[in-house]
Image: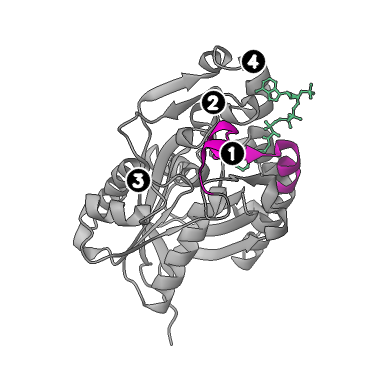
């Protein structure tokens, strides 16, 4: 049987209006731009309004991706939303997005793989398209991290931001050579406590005690995560490039998860790539978790940096722990 290759046919993204700068943060917790910027590469991040939910941002990014791909809502047969900050524990945020976009023929579900979430969802989309189970898939990464951040904890609140990004995945044009050339994912649950939210699930339901102890917010051992991030991202990126039948020098653009500019620089170094080949939005967005790769991708596609025929490498790492990498030959 002839293999169907999956390709990205259009991208979209959305950032909320409100900008929160490092100077703003220095008035909220004991920190400063002088501490944050050199250690993380972040100067500001966007924060969603109280009435602006993850599903709203996801729907807006999705709408823009559908438009870019020239796809009608009724053509989408699968919607996968990657998020750790969905509107509510039940139902899946994807179902709310389905309703907002009028995707009447889609099956909709969420994927939870934290900062690797978009690439896990892209991998799911690729498998559905390759197997013929779906023709057009909308993949979204969307986060309202501000709602699950402890704004009194300077070790985490300086890092995160809100936003959404999306892509339409469908069969590649036959014979074009374009599309998703490789996609790898991995997880290691033994390291789960390094980055987690303790309360709010069935193991530790929300209570007066968990609220008072702020156990419903993201907690992270940043220093240890940093080391695993560099090692795993570099390793999985090199393997994905090899699986795509390419050499690191063949990669035109690296679109990495935006957690820390120093992690991004270390990954670029492993790939022997100058920072000119890296799409970095972190200075203005912070870490938007599952939204970070599709946000950066959409920006680089719309401003003309990523062009047809370019080899684009995605690589991510996050809570779980999880990691993923994919290589795409960009199409029209
Ligand atoms: O999205 C995927 C998952 N997340 C990541 O990949 C994040 C990975 N980790 C990181 O990016 C870095 O570890 C951080 C940026 C979070 C922290 O940088 P670090 O160089 O690892 O700092 P540290 O946690 O070792 O803290 C160094 C010092 C500590 O003070 P002492 O103990 O040396 O006196 C902290 O208390 O800096 C202090 N500190 C701060 N000072 C001012 C921690 N946060 C802040 C802050 N402002 N915001």
Which of the labelled discs sits on residue 30, or is there none?
4
Q: Which residue is depicted at the point 57% across and 49% down?
A: 204
Whole-angstrom CA distance, mark 4 to mark 1, is 21 Å
Looking at the rendering, the stretch of residues picked out in magenta corresponds to 205-228
Q: Is 157 above or below relative to 164?
A: above
Q: Quadrant of ligand 1?
A: top right
Q: Which residue is depicted at the point 55% across and 30% down?
A: 150
Q: From the viewer's perspective, is the residue at label 4 or at label 3 nearer?
A: 4
Which of the labelled discs sits on residue 125, or is there none?
none
Q: Is 63 above or below relative to 190?
A: above
Classify mark 2: helix, strand or loop: loop
- In the rendered image, is residue 313 in sight? no
Q: Farthest residue in the bottom direction?
A: 1
Q: Circle 4: is it few (<14), some (14-19), or many (20+) Cα within 10 Å?
A: few
Whole-angstrom CA distance, mark 1 to mark 3, is 26 Å
- In the rendered image, is residue 302 in sight? yes
| Residue 298 image position (x, y, % from top left) | 41, 43
Identify the residue position indicated by label 3 in the image.
58
Q: Quadrant of the C terminus?
A: bottom left
Which of the labelled discs sits on residue 215, or is there none?
1
Kindly tell me whether mark 1's CB lies below 8 Å from ligand 1: no
Identify the residue position indicated by label 2 in the image.
151
Viewer-side residue, 282 vs 310: 282
Whole-angstrom CA distance, mark 4 to mark 3, is 33 Å
312 left or right of 10 in image: right
Place residue 7 in its image quadrant: bottom left
The earlier-in-sequence mark between 4 and 1 is 4
Whole-angstrom CA distance, mark 2 to mark 1, is 13 Å
The earlier-in-sequence mark between 3 and 2 is 3
| Residue 14 image position (x, y, % from top left) | 35, 38
């Amino acid at each position: 049987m002839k293999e169907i290759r999956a390709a990205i046919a259009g991208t979209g993204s959305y950032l909320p209006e409100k900008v929160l700068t490092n100077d703003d943060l220095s008035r909220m917790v004991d920190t400063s731009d002088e501490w944050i910027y050199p250690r993380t590469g972040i100067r500001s991040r966007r924060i969603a309004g109280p009435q602006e939910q993850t599903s709203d941002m996801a729907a807006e990014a999705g709408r823009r991706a559908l438009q870019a791909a020239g796809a009608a809502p009724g053509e989408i047969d699968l919607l996968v939303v990657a998020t750790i900050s969905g509107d509510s524990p039940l139902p899946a945020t994807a179902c709310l997005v389905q309703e907002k976009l009028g995707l009447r023929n889609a099956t909709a579900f969420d994927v939870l793989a934290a900062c690797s979430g978009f690439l896990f969802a892209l991998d799911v989309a690729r498998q559905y398209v390759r197997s013929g189970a779906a023709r057009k898939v909308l993949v979204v990464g969307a986060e309202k991290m501000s709602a699950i951040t402890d704004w009194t904890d300077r070790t985490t609140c300086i890092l995160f931001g809100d936003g959404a990004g999306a892509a339409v995945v469908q069969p590649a044009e036959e014979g074009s050579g374009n599309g998703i050339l490789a996609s790898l994912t991995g997880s290691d649950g033994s390291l789960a406590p390094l980055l987690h939210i303790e309360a709010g699930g069935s193991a530790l339901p929300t209570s007066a005690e968990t609220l008072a102890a702020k156990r419903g917010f993201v907690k992270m051992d940043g220093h240890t995560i940093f080391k695993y991030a560099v090692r795993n991202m570099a390793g999985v990126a090199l393997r994905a490039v090899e699986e795509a039948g390419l050499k690191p020098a063949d990669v035109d653009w690296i679109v990495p998860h935006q957690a820390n500019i120093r992690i991004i620089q270390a990954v670029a170094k492993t790939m022997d790539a100058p920072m000119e080949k890296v799409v970095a939005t972190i200075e203005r967005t912070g870490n938007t978790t599952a939204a970070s790769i599709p946000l950066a991708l959409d920006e680089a596609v719309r401003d003309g940096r990523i062009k047809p025929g370019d080899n684009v490498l995605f690589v991510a790492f996050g809570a779980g722990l999880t990691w993923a990498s994919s290589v795409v030959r960009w199409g029209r």
